[in-house]
Image: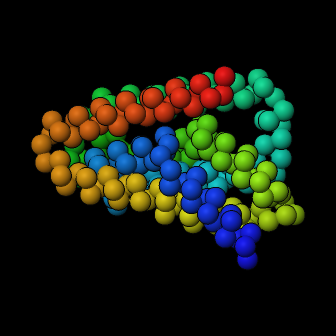
Amino acid sequence: MSLIIAMSLFALSMSVSPGPVNLVTFSSGLNYGFMRSLPFVAGAALGFTLLLVVVGLGLGEIIALSPVLMQVLAYTGTAFICYMGYKIATAHPELPGASERQPHFFQGAALQWLNPKAWIASLSGVSAFEATLGNGLFIFASLYLVICFFSIAVWAFAGARVSGLLYDRSNLQWCNRIMGGLLVIVAIYLLYLHI
């Protein structure tokens, strides 16, 4: 039972802490509302869980042993996260209900696979709990799926609540610029950690 608690606390701390996915989710909640952000949340949770399972099945060892693959992942992930930050920062301010440029399920899943924080969480979680096919990988992945979904959804909910305070389109535009800028800074920082 203590292993399940430890796995759950690890999943919670990695899922709820600020990072690229959570910043995009907050921005989506801010611009489109909580309910319209749930497809992105679901994509991010499922995308991460699939990444965790694949790492646990052995991809993590291959990636960890190949510095070239780690570099490609770091640069590709940084570029994609910077692109998402740019899209958020330059988005026209829309109040909830707008459909233009709304993040969707597949963007959530793809962002996890290109997110260095997700790779760090997967590699360290699988290593820490020795989560492999015969050793609790699917228990860990199942716990992570539920915890990750609700943790990311909290960011969408927070964004939706903040949007109620931003009645003025110029305030919303400034908030988008700040969130997009923060996302670019996080991406560059994560790249710096890997080079």
| Image position of 57 with respect to 2: above or below | above
| Left or right position of 177 against 116 | left
Q: Residue at x 60, y 41 (%)?
A: 117
Q: Which quadrant of the rendered structure holds the N terminus?
A: bottom right
| Left or right position of 81 against 5 | left
In the rendered image, residue 173, in percent from the top left (x then y), is placed at 22, 35
Q: How is the image coloured?
A: rainbow
Report whether residue 35 is seen. yes
In the rendered image, residue 120, in percent from the top left (x then y), is placed at 67, 42
Q: Residue at x 26, y 57 (%)?
A: 161
- Tally of marks: 0
| Left or right position of 129 against 165 | right
Q: Which quadrant of the rendered structure holds the C terminus?
A: top right
In the rendered image, residue 42, in percent from the top left (x then y), is placed at 50, 57
Q: Residue at x 38, y 55 (%)?
A: 156
In-front residue for pair 83/190: 190
Q: In the image as oriented, which residue stretches furthest toward the bottom?
A: 1
Q: In the image as oriented, which residue stretches furthest toward the left?
A: 168
Report whether residue 45 is seen. no
Q: Residue at x 44, y 29 (%)?
A: 184
| Image position of 47 with respect to 111: above or below | below
